[in-house]
Image (spheres, helix red, strand yellow):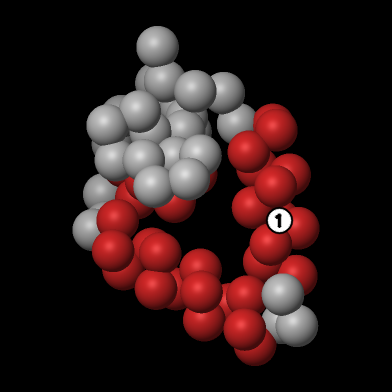
Amino acid sequence: MDNNKKLTRSRSDKMLAGVCGGLAEYFGLDSSLVRIGYVLLSLFTAFAGVLVYIIMWLIVPEKR
């Protein structure tokens, strides 16, 4: 396991702000699966996922 791995927003796999793409890269998953999971999470939590996405957009740095 790579101990120097950092969570960053993706620049190459970017739809809106790169948050889902960055999460997919960090966990080694397909970005489409992360996006589908995000949409389902948002729908089942009365759109709390939108707030989480905006917070992550502001906090997680973009990949250099």
Q: Residue 2 at x, y = what percent?
A: 31, 29
Left or right for 1, reference 5 = left
Asked whether 3 or 29 is in front, the reply is 29
Tell me where residue 5 appears, x and y as whole percent. 39, 27
**Marker count (numbered):** 1
Give the quarter of the figure containing the N terminus. Answer: top left
User: Depth check: 7 or 48 in front?
Assistant: 48
Q: Is residue 22 visible?
A: no
Mark yes or no: residue 60 visible: yes
Q: Residues within 10 Å of mark 1 (few under 14, many from 20)?
A: few
- Residue type pointed to by label 1: Val
Residue at position x 40%, y 64% from top? 35
At 38% from the left and 33% from the top, the residue drawn is 10
Residue furthest to the front:
16
Q: Quadrant of residue 41?
A: bottom right
At numbered mark 1, what does the secondary structure look like: helix, strand or loop? Answer: helix
Determine the residue positioned at 65% across, 42% down: 56
Compared with residue 40, is residue 31 higher up or lower down, i.e. above or below?
above
Q: Quadrant of residue 34?
A: bottom left
- Which residue is at a point 70% across and 33% down the rendered structure image? 58
| Above or below 8: residue 28 | below
Q: Residue furthest bottom?
A: 44
Could you say where residue 49 lies in the image, as x and y percent from the top left? 67, 66
Identify whether 63 is placed above or below 38: above
Residue, disc 1: 52
